[in-house]
Structures are given as structure tokens and as C-alpha cells.
């Protein structure tokens, strides 16, 4: 009589490192970026001008991309209204109806201050926290969802401002910075650097293409403001006053840039989505156990999974050609190509992979 024995493999995987007694056949690792993309891009907007809804939103929907839209509290009302800073012409802003529509269609809504003023770096942290919570609470009460990202007004930060942002409950803070991109491991999630579109020709096509190239292995955040048609009243006003950095561009230019982003092959997602993935990836381990024709992959994380709820992608290498997956974000039966399979799993969950005949 010939007895057949099943074997058990058990090993821990720390972040991106896979260790196995049979590495060539079975291994698993958390990918650096979602779905094993080679980099990430986030498209972000400031001020919630109505032209973002009118021109940018349809383009994003056309290319099936989601972005982060930030608003100023005192500029946002039930219906679209005109507002501006002192000595600057009035610009139409979105109302709560448009903001809610963006949120309901998967775009992130972020805070850009209750007033469009720099946070005072010499103010006590308790005052800064009150100011930040004012805009955070306002948005959350309107969209009935958490607000995780703060776009600092004028990108102005300090140690006390960053501390207040964390105390206020924000997970991420976006500013500008000397670096063009954020590294795959964040130095400070409250100092996310971004690249601002200064006018219709800055960046030019070559410069924009270079930004996209630099996102390989990294995280590029784009910062947009207004979109005005060529010959519009707003563009003419700025032209007549020789305004160089208009923070405005033509809708056609915007679409060209977004088309480039969409064709890049990078993971394109809102700031909070990419940020959560990075934090989870750096604080999650996986354990792989194998018994006969079944593999169990369990995730162990130190983050609060009620907040950090972005699915992580696990790359599994195995010699099977037909498998079934349970417990993931994309359960079902699969044919394995090139001995690799990408599975999305929430932190703290367990997935089961079974060999099929």
C-alpha cells in the first residue's frame, strides 16, 4: 500500500519579503503599489471652483479616474456662488450639491481651510486644532463621510501646523516641496509634496512628461486650481494684468495632461487612497500556510482597520494553473498565468486559495 502524505509549510512575510522552504514554487508578498503597478499618481484640486466641476470632472469620468477635490469652508454654500480673496476678481465656486455628487461618484473631498488663509505658525496648537476641526467637521456633516486629507492653504506648514493636523484627525497633509515626488516609503505623511500647474504652459508638454516619468517607483501628486476656456473673461483679465502664475489652464490642456496620466500605466487614485495603502503596507505582515492543495494567507497589521481599510495587493507565486479564491476582495475561480496571481485583501483578513482540477 502506498500512502500519500500532505505537507505543511508555514512562514512569515515581513512587508515585501517572501521567505519559503520552496521559494521557486510557492511565495507571497505585498506589492509596493496596488495591483503591482510601477508607481502612483494622485490628481488634486484646490478651491472647488465651479470650472473643476464643469470641465475637469467630465474628463476624469471619461478616463475613469478618481481625484481629490478640496474646498474652502466660507466659500462653499448650498448653491454655487462667486467668491474670492481680497483684491482678486470673483470666481464661481461649487455648491454642496456638486461636492456631494463628486463624493458619491468616488472622488475624495478634502479640506483647504475654513478661510483661505495661512495657518499661523505661532498660534497655540489648541487654536490651530480648532480651526482645522471647523472645516473638517463642516465637510463631514455635509457629505456624511470622514475627511482624511488637508491641503494646507498656500502650502504653508510648520511643526506646530503639522502637529495640529494630526491632532485634528487628518491622516494626510498635502503641501508643495523641493522634491518632485513622494518616495514609496513616506518620510512624513503630513508633508506630501505636490507639483503645481502654474499656468497653461507651465509645465509644458515635455516638463509634464518628465514629471510622469519620475513617478516610476514613486508617488506623484498633481495640484490643479482653475480651468477657463481660451478667450474667457477670467483668462482675459489675467492676461491684461500680466499675471504669470495664473494657476489656471485651458480645458483642452487639462485633458491632454489627464490623457497622459491615464496612459502611463501607473496606479491613479485619490490622495487618501494611495496614502492608506502605503501606511498599511508598511505596518502589515503576512503569514502563508500550506496544507495539501490549499494555501492560507493571513495578514497581521498594527493599524486601525476601521480607518485604514484600503485593500492591499498580494502577489502569490504558485505552480497551479486553476485555483479558487475565498476571503479576498475579488473571490472566484481563476486560471493562473505565468505562475503568478494578484489578490486584493483587506488588512487583518485571511484568504484561502484552493487548487482546482
Image (cartoon, helix red, strand yellow):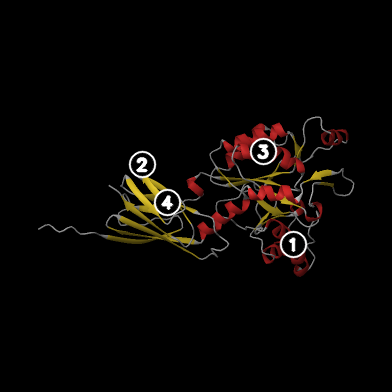
Q: Is residue 209 above or below residue 22?
A: above
- Dot 3 alpha-carbon crowd within 10 angstroms: few under 14, some 14 to 19, many 20 or more: few
Distance from label 3 to label 4 (Cα)? 32 Å
Looking at the image, do the residues carrying marks 1 and 2 touch, with CB atoms under 8 Å apart? Answer: no
Q: Going from the N terminus, do you reach mark 4 or mark 1 first?
A: 1
Name the quarter where the N terminus is drawn. bottom left
Distance from label 3 to label 2 (Cα)? 38 Å
Q: Which residue, given by chain and number where applicable, does mark 1 sit on?
A: 132
**Left/right of residue 26 with respect to residue 305 in the rendered view:** left
Q: Going from the N terminus, do you reach mark 1 or mark 3 first?
A: 3
Q: Which residue, given by chain and number where applicable, does mark 3 sit on?
A: 58
Q: Going from the N terminus, do you reach mark 2 or mark 4 first?
A: 4
**Left/right of residue 210 with respect to residue 235 in the rendered view:** left
Distance from label 1 to label 3 (Cα)? 30 Å
Q: Residue at x 72, y 62 (%)?
A: 137
Badge 2 element: loop
Looking at the image, do the residues carrying marks 4 and 1 touch, with CB atoms under 8 Å apart? Answer: no
Question: Could you say which disc has been placed on residue 331 in the image?
Answer: 4
Q: In this view of the protein, can residue 218 be seen by the observer?
A: yes
Looking at the image, do the residues carrying marks 1 and 3 touch, with CB atoms under 8 Å apart? Answer: no
Q: Going from the N terminus, do you reach mark 1 or mark 2 first?
A: 1
Amino acid at each position: 500500500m502506498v500512502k500519500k502524505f500532505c505537507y505543511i509549510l508555514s512562514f512569515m512575510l515581513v512587508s515585501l519579503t517572501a521567505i519559503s522552504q520552496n521559494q521557486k514554487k510557492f511565495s507571497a508578498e505585498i506589492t509596493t503599489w496596488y495591483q503591482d503597478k510601477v508607481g502612483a499618481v494622485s490628481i488634486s484640486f484646490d478651491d472647488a471652483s465651479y470650472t473643476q466641476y464643469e470641465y475637469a470632472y467630465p474628463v476624469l469620468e471619461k478616463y475613469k479616474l478618481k481625484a481629490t477635490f478640496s474646498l474652502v469652508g466660507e466659500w462653499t454654500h448650498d448653491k454655487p456662488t462667486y467668491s474670492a480673496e481680497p483684491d482678486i476678481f470673483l470666481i464661481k465656486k461649487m455648491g454642496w450639491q456638486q461636492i456631494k455628487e463628486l463624493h458619491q461618484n468616488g472622488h475624495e473631498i478634502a479640506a483647504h481651510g475654513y478661510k483661505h488663509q495661512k495657518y499661523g505658525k505661532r498660534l497655540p496648537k489648541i487654536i490651530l486644532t480648532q480651526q482645522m476641526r471647523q472645516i473638517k467637521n463642516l465637510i463631514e456633516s455635509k457629505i456624511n463621510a470622514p475627511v482624511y486629507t488637508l491641503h494646507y492653504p498656500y502650502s504653508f506648514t510648520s511643526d506646530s501646523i503639522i502637529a495640529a493636523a494630526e491632532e485634528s484627525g487628518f491622516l494626510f497633509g498635502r503641501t508643495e516641496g523641493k522634491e518632485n515626488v513622494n518616495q514609496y516609503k513616506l518620510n512624513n505623511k503630513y508633508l506630501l509634496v505636490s507639483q503645481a500647474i502654474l499656468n497653461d504652459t507651465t509645465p509644458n508638454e515635455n516638463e509634464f512628461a518628465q514629471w510622469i516619468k519620475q513617478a516610476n517607483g514613486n508617488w506623484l501628486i498633481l495640484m490643479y486650481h482653475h480651468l477657463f476656456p481660451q478667450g474667457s473673461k477670467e483668462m482675459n483679465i489675467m492676461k491684461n494684468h500680466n499675471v504669470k502664475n495664473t494657476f489656471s489652464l485651458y480645458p483642452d490642456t487639462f485633458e491632454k495632461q489627464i490623457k497622459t496620466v491615464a496612459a502611463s500605466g501607473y496606479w491613479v487614485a485619490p490622495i487618501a487612497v494611495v496614502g492608506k495603502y502605503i501606511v498599511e503596507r508598511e505596518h502589515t505582515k503576512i503569514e502563508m500556510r500550506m496544507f495539501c492543495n490549499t494555501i492560507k494567507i493571513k495578514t497581521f497589521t498594527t493599524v486601525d482597520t476601521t480607518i485604514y481599510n484600503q485593500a492591499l495587493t498580494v502577489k502569490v507565486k504558485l505552480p497551479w494553473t486553476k485555483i479558487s479564491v475565498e476571503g479576498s476582495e475579488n473571490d472566484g475561480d481563476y486560471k493562473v498565468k505565468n505562475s503568478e496571481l494578484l489578490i486584493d485583501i483587506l488588512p487583518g483578513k485571511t484568504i484561502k486559495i484552493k487548487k482546482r482540477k
